[in-house]
Image (spheres, rainbow, N blue to C red):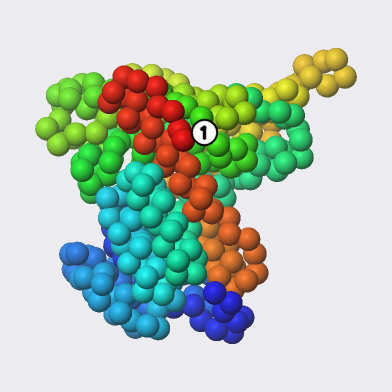
Amino acid sequence: MGYGKGEVIRVGIIGCGGIANGKHIPGILGVEGVEIVALCDIIPERAEQTKESFGLTGAKVYQDYKDLLKDETIDDVQVCTPNRSHSFITIDALEAGKNVMVEKPMAINAAEAKAMIDASKRTGKALTVAYQNRQSPEMQILKAEAEAGTFGRIYYAKAQALRRRGVPTWGVFMNEYEQGGGPLIDICTHSLDGTLWILNNYKPKRCFGTTFHMLGKMPAEYQGNGWGEWDPEKFTVEDSAFGMCIMEDGTLITLETSWALNTLDTVDEGRTFLCGTLAGADCTDDGVRINGVRDGQMYVDIINDKTERGAPYYDGRGWEGFGIREQQVWYDYLRGEGELVVKPEQAYVVSQILEGIYESARTGKEIVFD
């Protein structure tokens, strides 16, 4: 860290799939003083296509990420691979002297997330996790209001990410081995991260939950998926999940998430619902609604965040600014010009809770955290 204003930060991208092409690379290209100098993918043609698509004429292309890490001129690595490989690629990159931004979720389980934190501390290199939804207007509004004391003591919150039919049929999203789970680890991870961040509460005490493998096994005539028909035999993750986590101070957080659920009560990923002693809040298509009592009268204030909705970095609507801001604050931090927005210790707690809910669903028991 400590790069000067005129010094270019050289970046290597590991994994050239949808999230790299849709978010990370456009975000980096929106930041001054940063240059993408290397691309890596296990399918080298995919890396070559990325290089051509973005006009990265000077970037080197690698098939093995370890070869990319040997380049001592690379300052920063962004890990955009399936969940299972997040931890070992990140640790190798840190050990190679690179700062790292890893795509969410931090890791496939809490133990691997902890090993990543240990590696960051051991090497002195910076580590962050790509929870770009913290940069959304609604999350920024809720965070500011919480810090201003608008809600008083927040004692109940919901982390929501509900799709009626939004099963990602590309890549390895439906593969439990590669991803570690379905909508809970994929999209509800954003909602939980944002909720914990707004509450500034990272001390879970116990949790329980359940997952459902129902609609994912249905034949084509019952699917109606917006992103095309899926193969039930390859749908090995949950299609919906629900859970509760009680924090050490008694705060209750519920989690509701789905890729496929017969409901009209759909909620985009990254949204949260808050109840405090002075006021509450939720996020709607009209904006952030804050409700409470003022001068003896109930009130509702609506703050319009002007955010268009859709699947982030897939349908191309209204999300590009989040990715640029995510990269800007990361590189500002590396230059010593700001705070680390997503601390790895925070992302670790997200992984801890998600793993607890999966374990509770598997065993039918409440999970108690140490």
- Where residue 54 appears, as percent x and y from the top left, is 36, 70
Give the quarter of the figure containing the N terminus.
bottom right
Q: Is residue 222 above or below residue 166?
A: above
Q: Residue at x 14, y 36 (%)?
A: 234
Relative placement, left or right, of 292 versus 350 is right
Task: Name the residue nearer the viewer: 191 or 205.
Answer: 205
Q: Which residue is mark 1?
A: 204
Residue 201 occupies which quadrant of the picture?
Answer: top right
Relative placement, left or right, of 177 versus 195 is left
| SS label for mark 1 | strand
Q: Is residue 79 above or below residue 134?
A: below
Q: How dense is the environment of label 1, judged by Cα within 10 Å: few (below 14), some, or many (20 and up)?
A: many
Marks counted in the figure total 1
- Where residue 343 appears, as percent x and y from the top left, is 54, 54
Q: Residue at x 46, y 46 (%)?
A: 348
- Where residue 75 appears, as percent x and y from the top left, is 44, 76
- Where residue 17 appears, as percent x and y from the top left, is 28, 58
Q: Is residue 5 above or below residue 40?
A: below
Task: Name the residue nearer the viewer: 123 or 58.
Answer: 123
Task: Name the residue nearer the viewer: 41 or 113.
Answer: 113
Task: Name the residue nearer the viewer: 57 or 337.
Answer: 337
Q: Residue at x 35, y 63 (%)?
A: 91
> Is residue 129 visible to the viewer in this orientation of the structure?
yes
Relative placement, left or right, of 290 versus 93 is right
